[in-house]
Image: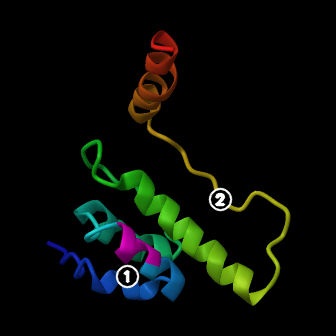
Amino acid sequence: MSQVPNPMSILNSFHPAVAAWFTRTFAAPTAAQSAAWPALAAGNSVLVAAPTGSGKTFAAFLTAIDQLVKEGLAAPLPDETRIVYVSPLKALSNDIQRNLDAPSRHP
């Protein structure tokens, strides 16, 4: 059984500005985020299976944002696609319902 890193110490791998924003915005990383961040930071492909609302999408996005911040500080970022995120179909369906369909029914 692998050991999950300390949720707050894992933030030390992020750029200080990214880590500071996270700690101002959230109480602590979720278990899904703490488990995924080391592998994502190492450049590995990661499949995170966890319940809806557990922070899976944000685990991927924050890692990508951190990478872009670090690269952008070292040199100008090229004008190209650097990150591809594949959304699970169930999450996409929920997002469409919550963000598009429901609001259109209640103007």
Q: Secondary structure at mark 1?
A: helix
Mark 1 Cα within 10 Å, few/some/many (few <14, many 20+)?
Answer: many
Which quarter of the picture shows residue 6?
bottom left
Q: Is residue 46 visible?
A: no
For residue 35, say whether it is visible.
yes
Label disc, if present, on residue 31 of the rendered structure: none
Packing grade of label 2 (10 A; few <14, some 14-19, many >=20) is few
Q: Is residue 52 above or below residue 56?
A: above
Nearest the camera: 38 or 12?
12
Residue 82 coordinates in the image, percent (x, y)? 71, 62
Describe residue 36's horizontal placement relative to residue 81 as left or right.
Answer: left
Residue plotted at (41% across, 72% down)? 22
Quadrant for residue 65, please give it: bottom right
Which residue is tagged 2?
Answer: 83
Type of the residue with mark 1: Leu
Residue extending farthest to the front is 107
From the viewer's perspective, is the residue at label 2 or at label 1 nearer? 1
**Vertical side of 24 occupied by 82: above or below:** above
Q: Amino acid at mark 2?
A: Ile
Q: Is residue 100 above or below residue 60?
A: above
The quarter of the image holding the N terminus is bottom left
Examine the structure image and report whether residue 62 is included in the region drawn in magenta: no
Give coordinates of residue 98: x percent, y percent. 42, 27
Give me the residue at 82% from left, 60% from top. Answer: 80
Tell whether 27 sits left or right of 55: left
Q: What segment is highlighted magenta in the picture? A: 21-25
Name the residue tied to disc 1: 11
Q: Which of pointers 2 and 1 lies earlier in the amino acid sequence?
A: 1
Disc 2 to disc 1, how far (Cα)? 21 Å
What residue lies at 82% left-to-right and 79% top-to-bottom?
A: 76
